[in-house]
Image (cartoon, helix red, strand yellow):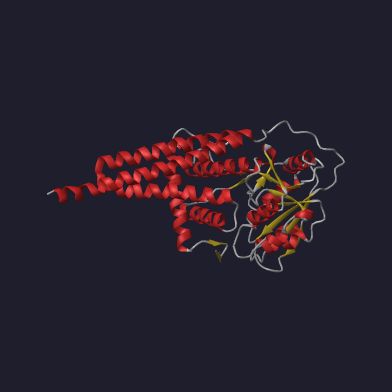
Amino acid sequence: MNIEIAWDLWPEMIFWGVLGINALCLLAYGRQIHLWTKRLSQAPKPNQEELIRSDVSKWITVVIPCRNEAENLPSLLSDLAKQTCPIEILVVDDHSSDATIGIAKTAGVKCISNQAHGKKAALRQAHGKVKTPWMATLDADVRIGADWAKSMMQCIQNNQSGDDKETQAILGTVRIEAKPNSQWQRFQSLEYGCLMAWIEGGVSSGTLAMGSGANSVYRTSTYPANELHENQASGDDAYALLAIKNNNGKIIWNSQRSAFVTTQPVQGWSELWQQRARWASKTVDGSDRETTTTGWIVAAVHFALILAIISGVACSSRGIAGILALFAAKGMMDRRLVSTAVDRYALPLKRLDLIRFPWRYAALVWGSWWHLLRGQVKWKGRKL
């Protein structure tokens, strides 16, 4: 009889043990969020933009690596044509099968063909063609405001201090454009905004070498073209910035809203899981320590939640109450980061988004890691 009672207690004992694991993971997660929001609060605030000398020459060549971007490229080229400061533009076609090359030539933009294959090879080839002191990388599917180049050039001017550690890279915010009435698009905008908040704070504090190749400017003379490895289907920005940091180069974040670029949300969960799985792969391939640690903490928190759900099923109402309590605790932590991102990047937010966010974010992490562990992640037809 006593043995039967002991066996009956096992599911509940396991559940409480899992709750303890979740508590430890949430403590680590909460500590990270506190660090991220604190760092971002100490980062330079956007201020009134200064005027740039009217006689300024072309300082920046905007490099746009393209593969089958005929649908997106015209809009970006139109934005670049409206810049209030002079720039050079270089399109590198990576064996497109659509009208990408024709669109670039029709717009009067210099276009070269990638002699090898892949984005990193395209960037290496473009680097050899750049004649300006600075080289910017933009993805073909982003949109920019008319003062984007002006803001980047102002940031260059403001950070020419003449010290031994000269600025080698300037990074800007990437926002996902969301329709205010779309829950799905708002979630993507908020989740990506949280990522930006972590990255901006980390770069500004000097602890991270992370950014987005969709909005980066590099000093041409020190661009680490030879550090763009081919063993990953993406990650040119991660490799370049980590190489700069390892060489003690200075990386600056341009917090001006005129330096923001926007991109479109994806259509469904499968595409989003693929995208995030591709990004997660960078956290275990030569990344700096904080990036790797953050990736594992986020994974641990969400996999502990899976264990809690599985073990909680056997505990009936107490199990369900425990699961809800875990999500409520995580939701409070997420809320702080989401609110910080909303204020910093002017993101659309509705009240119920803060309740839905922890559940959707958990689904995003679970699905992304499932795709990654299965080895089914691809980028433009190339398997990781």
What is the residue that sits farthest to the front in this orientation? 2
Can residue 101 be spotted in the picture? no
Of residues 102 and 198, the one nearer the viewer is 198
Left or right: 208, with 153 as reference point: left
- Residue at 75% across / 60% down in the picture? 126
- Quadrant including the C terminus: bottom right
What is the residue that sits farthest to the left in this orientation? 1
Q: Is 259 rendered above or below residue 67?
A: above
Left or right: 242, with 193 as reference point: right
Left or right: 322, with 253 as reference point: left
Q: Is 341 rendered above or below residue 104?
A: above
What is the residue that sits farthest to the right in this orientation? 55
Left or right: 131, with 122 as reference point: right
Number of marks in picture: 0
Residue 179: image quadrant is top right
Of residues 18 and 108, the one nearer the viewer is 18
What is the residue that sits farthest to the bottom in this orientation? 116
Return the x and y of residue 17 as percentages of the image width and height: 33, 46
Q: Is 48 rendered above or below residue 207?
A: above
Of residues 192 and 78, the one nearer the viewer is 192
Return the x and y of residue 144 as percentages of the image width and height: 68, 44
- Residue at 78% across / 33% down in the picture? 50
Return the x and y of residue 279 as percentages of the image width and height: 55, 54
Q: Is 190 rendered above or below residue 235?
A: above
Can residue 8 be spotted in the picture? yes
Return the x and y of residue 164 as percentages of the image width and height: 79, 45
Of residues 205 and 337, the one nearer the viewer is 205
Residue 162: image quadrant is top right
Residue 113: image quadrant is bottom right
